[in-house]
Amino acid sequence: MTLHTALILLTALVIGLVVGGLTFLGGTPAASAVLAGLLSAGGSVPVLRTLIG
């Protein structure tokens, strides 16, 4: 794994955790918060690839 890939995946993980945590703290059920975190992490990978690339 290259440093570029590791940086993108780590940043996507942090984004997913933040979005999922804030969604959970907003009062939604845990399953919805996990889904929001996964979707935001997955959606941020292509964007981060073009920004950091």
Image (tube, rainbow, N blue to C red):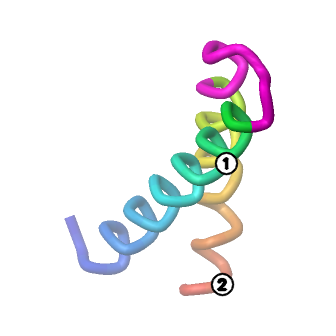
Q: Residue at x 24, y 73 (%)?
A: 2
Closer to the eye: label 1 or 2: 1
Label 1 residue SS: helix
Q: Is residue 18 magenta?
A: no
Label 2 residue SS: helix
Q: Residue at x 69, y 45 (%)?
A: 22
* Residue situated in front as seen by the camera: 27 or 37: 27
Figure quadrant of the C terminus:
bottom right
Residue 34, given in percent of the width and then of the height, sits at 59, 26
Residue 52 figure quarter? bottom right
Q: Is residue 24 above or below residue 19?
A: above
Residue 46, given in percent of the width and then of the height, sits at 65, 61
Few, some or many residues within 10 Å of mark 1 (<14, 14–19, 20+)? many
Few, some or many residues within 10 Å of mark 2 (<14, 14–19, 20+)? few
Figure quadrant of the N terminus:
bottom left
Q: For this view, does 3 lie left or right of residue 7?
A: left
Residue type, numbered disc 2: Leu
Q: Is residue 31 magenta?
A: yes
Residue type, numbered disc 1: Val
Q: Is residue 38 above or below residue 48?
A: above
Residue 16, given in percent of the width and then of the height, sits at 57, 48
Residue ID for mark 1 = 19
The segment highlighted magenta reads 26-34
Q: For this view, does 38 lie left or right of residue 5?
A: right
For marks 1 and 2 on the same chain, the one whose residue lies earlier in the sequence: 1
Residue 50, given in percent of the width and then of the height, sits at 66, 78
Q: Residue at x 59, y 48 (%)?
A: 41
Q: Residue at x 37, y 74 (%)?
A: 7
Residue ID for mark 2 = 51
